[in-house]
Amino acid sequence: MTLDMLPIGRSARIVAVDWSALVQEEARRLRALGLEEGARIAVSHRGILGGRDPIAITVGRMTVAVRRAHAAAMEVEEL
């Protein structure tokens, strides 16, 4: 399943990221925030407008907002 499909409150581990689907600068920022293969994450909130953007992701003790398109490039497995 991709990260954009992960239900709110569920924990998961990122198993793969399609870096080629992302703009190079955006991919660099996501990596700097720890959103790469092996990271344990959880969806804490989704936006309410339109495509439910942005998605709030908890990574460790930090919460990061990502676009739905970025989350769709991340393959996760639920823990």
Image: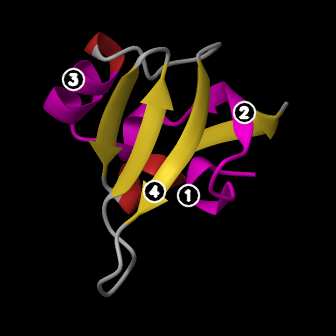
Residue 33 quadrant? top left
* Amino acid tagged 1: Asp
Give the residue pinned by disc 3: 29
Q: Earlier in the sequence, mark 2 or mark 3?
A: 2
Q: Which mark is residue 45?
A: 4
Cβ atoms at labels 1 and 3 below 8 Å apart: no
Residue in the foreground of this view, choosing between 9 and 75: 9
**Mark in the foreground, 2 or 1:** 2
Residue drawn at point x = 32 percent, y = 47 percent: 66
Question: Which stretch is magenta?
Answer: 1-30
Q: Is residue 16 visible?
A: yes
Q: Which residue is mark 1?
A: 4
Q: Is residue 35 above or below residue 45?
A: above
User: Is 40 or 2 nearer to us in this picture?
Assistant: 40
> What number is the disc on residue 12?
2
- Quarter assignment of residue 38: top right
Residue 12: x percent and y percent? Answer: 72, 33
Q: Amino acid at mark 4?
A: His
What residue sits 67% from the left and 54% below the top?
6
Q: CA distance from mark 2 to mark 1?
A: 12 Å
**Which corner quadrant of the image does residue 45 belong to?**
bottom left
Disc 4 vs disc 1: Cβ atoms closer than 8 Å? no
